[in-house]
Structure formats: structure tokens, C-alpha cells
Image (cartoon, helix red, strand yellow):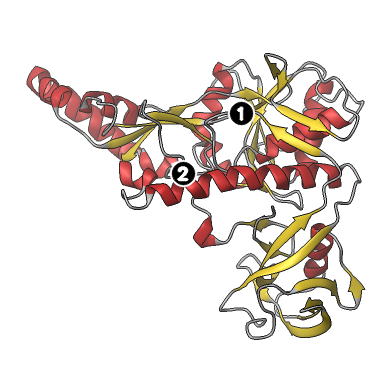
């Protein structure tokens, strides 16, 4: 089933804001691997330098008495660190991590690892405050009150459901993006799911309307609709052809500025894709949308005869839209450490996460910034060829 997406002129799509929280609730063990497109706070907000300095100073001044007190005081925090990684090109007991049926696939060399963040909650797994402070000071961890990650007790089930839904819809978006990047248009029924109250389409379009064209030209794919919206400046009119109750209708209304100088219609689309292949992801206890980029790359690698990686070990993270745009995620510092620890030598990071990446890259890891699936595919091909001189990094465009 499709998911509701907001459309901007560059083709980016996201879940509607009220549905986008994606936190997996830990199991009985008190810890779980989270796909960190979730609710953990931005690492730079959690561990500012002055607070680290204060922590170290206090620990030094307090002496044995303070250390003893800190080691026994209870604390209710969420502790995050590098989680397990999963090679999307590998098999586990003969079962592919990313399994494709309905099209020929080809052997792939190297690794394409999705990365996760592991989160433990001190209310379920006791930790001393000393442990909390150590993690707080670590560049590969974060510490924050539990409610910042898991919400209040009455929100936890909702967050878990949203996170699992984001995991599922990210796989569909990844499949569409990969196929279209390889030149295979994916037909879609483009149903209006919601009209924002700020949109000029409010009172004109309604949930359930099916968009069939823009400015007199037929639109039958999600990317086609996204591109059509992008062919104008914010504020310019757009004419939309749509079906309502089986009757063809037409409406003209103004577009909005998305805040980045790009035109949007201010509506959410629930695209029902007619996929020519079936893709199954066989990874347990991971949720959220931020593995989408690595899913897309795995699909592209498996569907092409080219040996893109040439044996290279690449990890990465990033949400993916059905139109192939890479979005930012949380927990990228921890994910880089997890990738390095798993043996990856290269890492793909969303360009919008570069502020967190710069200055925090662990030794032994080369990080390249990507904005689109095309960027990412070009990056793994360059890495496999052994020439990364033209690739963008978070230190240099």
C-alpha cells in the first residue's frame, strides 16, 4: 500500500509532519537497533563542548566521594550508541538481506551496509549515572531524557507504529527510486490524501481526488508529477486535471514556497505504485526510514551487470524519496563509528547532515556527501573504480 507524501519542486517527498515520528520502542531487553531517521535528538544538541568540559571538571573535582555518589544514583535516560550494520548485498543462511523477484539479478561484489543506532533506556536496563556521564562525553554516543526519544508512556505505541510504517514505506520508495534511476518508469495512481490548510488548493481539491495531469499534459508517475510541479516558480499558478467520483475535472490554483525557494502544491499524495518487481527486506528489529538510500543502491547494484563496487566496502545512511532525493537522518555520528567498526572504509552521508559530519569523522573512514540517488550511485561507482577525487565531501563541495 502507498504512503502519503508531500511534494516539492525538486521531487522530494516526506511523510506528513504529524505522521513522521519514527521511534522503535525497545523490547524486553531494554535495547533495540533503531534506524536513526527517528526521534533521537541531533547529536550536537546533546553534547555541547562546554557541557562536556563541565562534566569532566566536576568529575575531577569531586574526588572519590562524588564518584561514589554518581555511581549509585538512579537515572532515567536514553543512551544511544553505534548499532549493528547490515550488508544489503549479503545473505544470511541463504536468505538475501534485500531480495528481488520478478527480474533477473546479477552477482555483486563488495558491501553496501545500512547503519543503525542502538538505544537503551535506563528505566528498563539499570545504568549508573557514572555510565551516563561517560556516554555523554563520548563522541560516538548520546544521552538524553527518555521522553525525548520514546515520548511519554501514552505516546510510545503511536511512535512505534509510525516508525514501523516509515520502515515499510521507505522500502517502497527505495524500489521506485531505484527502478526509475535505471530508466524504468513506475506507473502510479496519484490520489490526494490531504490538503494543507495553507494551500490554495484548499476547498478545490479533496482527499480521494486522483490527479491525472498537469497543465494539460498527462501525468502517470510520481516522478512525473513532481517534475511538473517543479517547472514553475513559487506562487505561479498550476492547472491540475483530476478524477472525482469517476468524472474528469480541472482546477487552477497558486503554488506555495516551501521555504527553500521551491514550489509546492501544499497537498499530500498517496501514490499507489504498480511495481514490476517484488522487493523484500529481511532485517529484523530495525525501524524508521533512514535505510532507504542503501536499499535503493542495493537494488540498483543487483539489477545491473556492472560491478559497481569492485569489492569496496561502503556503508551509508539517508532517507530516500520516490523521486530519488536523499534526506537527512539522526544519529549520524554513531552511524559513522558503527560503519568503521564493521570494516567499511567509505561512508555515504546526506548533504543536509554535513554540519554534524564535519569534524566528527572517525579515523579510517572516508565520508562522501550525497544529495540524490544519482549522486550516491556515482559515488559507489567511483569508489569501486578507486578514484574518488571528484566526489563531494562535507569539508568541500
Q: Position of residue 107 (x, y in %)?
A: 85, 19
Please tell me how crowded label 2 is: few (under 14), some (14-19), or many (20+) other residues with Cα within 10 Å.
many
Q: Position of residue 228 (x, y in %)?
A: 83, 68
Please tell me how crowded label 1 is: few (under 14), some (14-19), or many (20+) other residues with Cα within 10 Å.
few
Instruction: Identify which residue, 62 or 314, lies in the foreground.
Output: 314
Q: Quadrant of the C terminus?
A: top right
Q: Which structural element holds mark 1?
A: loop
Q: Which residue is the site of mark 1? A: 283
Q: Which residue is the site of mark 2? A: 23
Task: Say the numbered circle drawn on residue 330.
Answer: none
Q: With 19 as the anchor, is 203 left or right in this view?
A: right
In the depicted structure, whether residue 85 falls above or below residue 189: above
Cα distance in 3D space between marks 2 and 1: 16 Å
The residue positioned 59% from the left and 74% from the top of the image is 196
Of pointers 2 and 1, the one earlier in the residue sequence: 2
| Res 280 visible | yes
Q: Position of residue 341 (x, y in %)?
A: 54, 17
The residue positioned 57% from the left and 79% from the top of the image is 198
Amino acid at each position: 500500500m502507498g504512503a502519503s507524501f508531500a511534494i516539492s519542486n525538486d521531487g522530494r517527498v516526506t511523510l506528513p509532519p504529524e505522521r513522521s515520528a519514527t521511534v522503535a520502542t525497545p523490547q524486553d531487553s531494554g535495547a533495540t537497533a533503531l534506524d536513526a531517521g527517528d526521534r533521537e535528538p541531533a547529536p550536537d544538541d546533546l553534547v555541547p563542548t562546554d557541557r562536556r568540559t563541565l562534566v569532566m571538571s566536576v568529575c575531577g573535582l569531586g574526588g572519590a566521594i562524588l564518584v561514589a555518589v554518581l555511581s549509585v544514583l538512579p537515572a532515567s535516560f536514553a543512551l544511544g550508541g553505534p548499532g549493528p550494520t547490515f550488508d544489503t548485498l549479503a545473505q544470511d543462511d541463504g536468505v538475501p538481506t534485500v531480495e528481488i523477484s520478478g527480474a533477473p539479478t546479477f552477482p555483486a561484489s563488495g558491501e553496501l551496509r545500512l547503519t543503525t543506532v542502538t538505544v537503551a533506556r535506563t528505566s528498563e536496563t539499570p545504568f549508573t549515572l557514572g555510565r551516563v556521564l561517560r556516554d555523554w562525553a563520548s563522541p560516538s554516543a548520546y544521552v538524553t531524557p527518555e521522553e525525548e526519544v520514546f515520548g511519554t508512556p501514552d505516546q510510545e505505541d503511536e511512535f512505534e507504529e509510525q516508525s514501523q510504517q516509515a520502515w515499510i514505506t521507505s522500502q517502497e520508495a527505495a524500489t521506485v527510486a531505484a527502478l526509475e534511476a535505471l530508466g524504468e518508469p513506475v506507473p502510479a495512481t496519484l490520489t490526494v490524501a490531504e490538503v494543507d490548510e495553507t494551500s490554495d488548493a484548499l476547498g478545490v481539491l479533496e482527499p480521494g481526488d486522483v490527479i491525472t495531469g498537469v497543465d494539460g499534459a498527462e501525468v502517470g508517475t510520481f516522478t512525473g508529477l513532481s517534475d511538473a510541479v517543479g517547472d514553475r516558480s513559487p506562487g505561479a499558478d498550476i492547472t491540475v486535471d483530476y478524477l472525482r467520483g469517476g468524472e474528469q475535472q480541472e482546477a487552477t490554483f497558486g503554488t506555495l514556497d516551501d521555504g527553500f525557494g521551491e514550489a509546492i502544491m501544499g497537498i499530500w499524495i498517496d501514490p499507489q505504485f504498480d511495481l514490476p518487481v517484488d522487493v523484500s527486506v529481511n532485517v529484523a528489529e530495525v525501524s524508521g526510514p533512514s535505510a532507504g538510500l542503501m536499499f535503493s543502491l542495493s537494488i540498483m547494484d543487483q539489477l545491473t551487470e556492472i560491478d559497481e563496487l569492485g569489492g569496496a566496502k561502503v556503508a551509508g545512511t539517508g532517507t530516500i524519496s520516490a523521486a530519488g532525493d536523499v534526506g537527512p537522518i539522526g544519529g549520524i555520528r554513531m552511524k559513522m563509528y558503527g560503519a568503521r567498526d564493521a570494516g567499511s572504509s567509505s561512508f555515504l552521508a546526506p548533504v543536509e547532515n554535513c554540519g554534524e559530519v564535519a569534524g566528527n569523522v572517525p579515523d579510517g573512514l572516508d565520508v562522501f556527501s550525497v544529495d540524490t540517488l544519482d549522486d550516491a550511485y556515482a559515488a559507489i561507482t567511483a569508489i569501486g573504480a578507486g578514484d574518488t577525487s571528484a566526489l563531494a565531501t562535507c569539508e568541500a563541495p
